[in-house]
Amino acid sequence: MDQEGHRNDTGALSGDLAHIRTLMERSSRFISLSGLSGVFAGVMALGGARLAQYHVARAIGSPDDGVTYDLARTGVFQLDELSITLLVDAIMVLVLALLGAFWFTWRRSRHTGQRLWDPSARRLAWNLLIPLAAGGLTCLALLYHGLPGLVAPATLVFYGLALLNASKYTLDEIRWLALSELALGVVACFWVGAGLLFWALGFGVLHIVYGGLMWMRHERGKA
Amino acid sequence: MIGGLHKAFESRVRLGIMAVLTVNDHVEHGTLRDLLEVTDGNLASHIAALVEVKYVQVRKRFVGKRPNTSYKATAAGTRAFTEHLGAMEELLKRDLRR
């Protein structure tokens, strides 16, 4: 064969093994996910939560009541002015976070040499989106039945489950992020009044912490 | 020759093919070609050699109107590749100790 002559050469051998390891990793996992997209999403979420708190406090009249708003509202869901403001706020955070994730991951994929939309990315996206879509619809049902207090905990729990499912196809840190979101979501179910606070912790602080960790471990000095 | 090294894997492309196929279910021809950075013909001839020794299975079917070829490692292929990897690591350890 072509490489017969230096088969036993240590350099060639360790080169082959490194090549094999890279191929196994690259073909089965989406490794281009950038930690910076997590940090960016976290900052957007914190900003969105602060804005929501401001609007709620203004609507209710007491600045301290901002985080206990959900508990005060029971009964049939009404699309009042405040609900619309909060919905627009949430959608803006989501869109900005997704745009950021796309941009940072696209930048990262040029360094890892992995195509942005390869089979591993598709697998990651589907495994994330299916539980997430089911969770989104469940949250709409909670709103519809007049249980807005459970929406924040439910988004955290479903997001955690979706991440746990997707973590098999990407970097290991996602698994820890998933478990943290799940724990936080379950705890939040018992502090229904503090929905906004838990939401800010889960989507804001946890994203920044794990995103920063991923960046330090995989990207710092390489990008 | 050390035990566990398989003659069928004496090429970087074949090692690459087996590396990708052992950690994935079915892999399409185009995906494998891009991952390994080889030409269609080159990949096809290495695949043929691996099919010959029954380490790889070929699945040809139509997705809509387009033919779609994908490959899968057989149980024997996965076992042989794992043995081969172990033998390579053993060799490397021996070389480093010298």
Image (cartoon, rainbow, N blue to C red):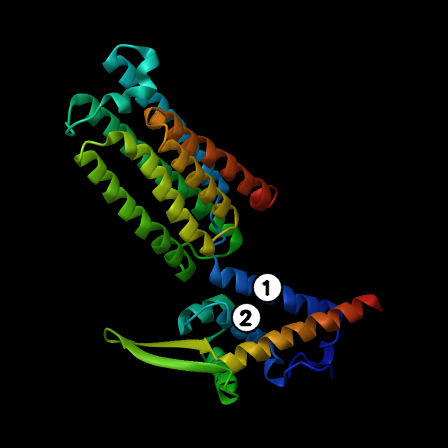
Identify the residue at image location x=17%, y=36%: A144
Left or right relative to A138: residue A164: right
Question: Where residue A109 sits: x, y (%)?
Answer: 47, 51
Cα distance between the residues tagged 1 and 2: 8 Å
Q: Hey, which residue is sitting farthest bottom in the picture?
A: B52
Which quarter of the rendered picture does the N terminus of chain A lie within? bottom right
Q: Chain of mark 2?
A: B
Q: Residue at x 58, y 76 (%)?
A: B81
- Check chain identity for marks 1 and 2: say if they share one: no
Q: Quadrant of residue B87?
A: bottom right
**Of the residues shown, which amino acid type is indicated by label 1?**
Arg
Q: Residues within 10 Å of mark 1 (few under 14, many from 20)?
A: some
Which residue corresponds to mark 1?
A: A21
Residue B6 sits in quarter: bottom right
Q: Identify the amino acid type marked 2.
A: Ala
- For the residue pair A82 and A194, the one nearer the viewer reads as A194
- Quadrant (top left/top right/bottom left/bottom right) for the C terminus of chain A: top right
Q: Nearer the viewer, residue A64 or A42?
A: A64
Tell me: A117 left or right of A92: right
Residue A15 location, x and y as percent? 67, 66
Please name the residue that numbered disc 2 is placed on: B19
**Who's the residue at 35% across and 33% down the image?**
A189
Q: What x and y, as percent, mark residue B66? A: 27, 75
**Is B30 placed left or right of A20 in the picture?**
left
Residue A223 in sight: no
